[in-house]
Image (cartoon, grey):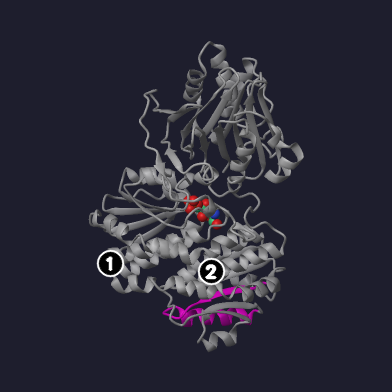
Amino acid sequence: MCGIVGCILKDNQAAPVLLDCVKRLEYRGYDSVGIATYSSSGIKIKKDKGKIDEVINQLHLDELSGEMGIGHVRWATHGLPTQENSHPHTDCDGKIAVVHNGIIENYKELRDKLEREGHHFTSQTDTEIIAHLIEKYHKQGLKLEEAMNQAISKLHGSYAFAVISAHEPGKIIGVRKESPLILGVGDDEYFLASDAPAILQHTRKIIYLADHETFIIGSDGITVKDANGKVLDKKIENIKWTPEMAQKGGYDHFMLKEIHEQPDAVKNTLFEVSEIEKVVSKFPEFKRVTFVACGTSYHASMVGKYLFEGLLGLPTDVILASEFEFAADALDPESLVIFISQSGETADTLKALRIANKKAETLAIVNVLGSTATREADHVIFTRAGPEIGVAATKTYISQLTSIYLLAACMGHDKELLDQLQQVPDWMEKTLSNEDEILTMAHKYKEAYDFFFIGRGFSYPTAMEGALKLKEITYIHGEGYAAGELKHGPLALIDDEVPVVAVVPPGKSHDKSLSNVEEVKARGARVIALGSSDDDVLKFEAHDMIEFSPKINELLSPLIYVVPLQLLSYHMSVARGIDPDKPKNLAKCVTVE
Ligand code: AGP
């Protein structure tokens, strides 16, 4: 949800470096792109709406000179995606430039006041007020850093921003509050970014900022201060992610690469079992568990409910993070609240975490090291999916599921489940090897305008996730439904133009789901069934069948059955001429409520 970068280098190559960094953040927003560099001739800015490569080619952004600068990719919140609303934004004199990720909630009243004081605005964004506020305090005689601190004291909302100024060249200053921001320490070169993949090719030495911390990057180093202005001794951490992990590696899209990385993501997450045992050993006795998450992470949480209730006998709720503040009254200290998040920065999830922290024990299951959720929850488990760039979550979903299964196995001392999980990577490889069949299916169904995905029990979340993948990257309407609920309304929508994807693994729910397949067929639906290769009845009923090993029972099926659904959406997206890595209107990390 917007990405910001910045650098101070040894040579005057800041522009190409900034562009390389913002390109790696394109998954955070692709409405517009812009950079500002500083050289002896002052601050120069180039920016426009549109995808990064198009804008670079048209405006020759890389030709700006200077040793330092800031850059931005935008996911529009305030104001349309236009050239004027693209970042960086400046003050009245063009001497202060700002890039920002987040939302300034009180920007209207601040803007009205600044306009009355004579400031001239050129955009509709909330961000521009930051440049004008700093200008105002600077003109009152404050140094740049003090002016920024004064500006911060007036801002409500969430923000990570970076500022350069021709008044005090040679430094980049900024702050983090409720929006992600990291600093990078290179070889006499320094960086800032919303997310580590942006700067991995320059350094893996990272400083994680906490909320309200400000920074000053100069050519001789980085200073971080707390909200009271006290200089902090921040730890520099070496992250294990490599630059190659954040590249496409020969695949056409990040999403396809990430789908194929899933067996490794499971293996790497399985290695975390001893860390999970350590976390579990610190748990007090719980009477209740509540999972909280958004989107795909919510679907992983739904699987958690079936597991925790079925295996551990613990009453378990699943609540959408955006609904949590309206549903959290009954939490008590004997509750464990588990937050699932790839990014660890989703605004709704963080808000819910802060509420839960006051009332119960909290655990965050997160993929991004150093993210806010990992610093605020009582306990943390890391999924080991590696960086995920495609906007649609794939390997991180599988890693979340793996962590949840491991957690349930550790809490229930279930050695059998731990052993079964070891087979998941091989089953997944087998499924991935049948990609050609899915590609054929994708071409067959790509013109449909409406799909249903149905399943019961453990297969219900798989159906929901299959539908979400379809919606977000093919722009076809897909509805995930509990198979038994169809007859209570949506069956009215089923006809021969609405394909139904039925998730029917062997197990307790099998026979009832099979009846639902017959129901939709009786209304003319074309059925794509997912089931065991020895399920002859299902094969007979289905128009198309995606087969799995009979050994994958319904308990383990969420880990495998979702994979062909990811591939189906991916290939339909490509067949429809859409870029699956950058679906319209979406961003990887949703840092606004
Ligand atoms: C799914 O493909 C999406 N990227 C989205 O639903 C995502 O899962 C959701 O925004 C939650 O993000 P998080 O896991 O980073 O908190």
Instruction: Give the amino acid type for the residue marked by disc 2 in the picture.
Output: Val
Q: Identify residue type, mark 1.
A: Gly
Q: Which mark is residue 563?
A: 2
Q: Secondary structure at mark 1?
A: loop
> Residue at the top extreme?
141
State the CA–CA distance, disc 2 to disc 1: 27 Å
Q: Residue at the location (60% across, 77% down)?
A: 528
Q: Mark 2 vs mark 1: which is more N-terminal? A: 1
Q: Position of residue 246 (x, y in %)?
A: 54, 52
Which residue has dot 1 on it? Answer: 412
Query: Does residue 499 show up magenta in the picture?
Result: yes
Image coordinates of residue 189 in percent, x first then y, are: 51, 33
Q: How many marks?
A: 2
Seen in the picture, residue 137 relative to 79 is either above or below; the reply is above
Magenta region includes residue 375: no
**Residue that lies at the very extreme toward the right in this rendered image:** 58
- Pick the front one: 538 or 39: 39
* Left or right of 456, for residue 75: right
Seen from the viewer's position, the closer of residues 319 and 37 is 37
Please tell me whether mark 2 sits on a helix, a strand or a loop: helix
Quarter assignment of residue 407 = bottom left
Task: Look at the image and tell me in which quarter the N terminus lies.
Answer: top right
Residue under the point 57% across and 16% down: 136
- Packing grade of label 1 (10 A; few <14, some 14-19, many >=20) is some
Q: Position of residue 267 (x, y in %)?
A: 42, 65
Query: Residue 524, percent across and down?
Result: 66, 79
Residue at 37% across, 25% down: 231
Q: Is residue 138 visible?
A: yes
Looking at the rendering, the stretch of residues picked out in magenta corresponds to 498-523
Depicted 354 relative to depicted 174: above or below:
below
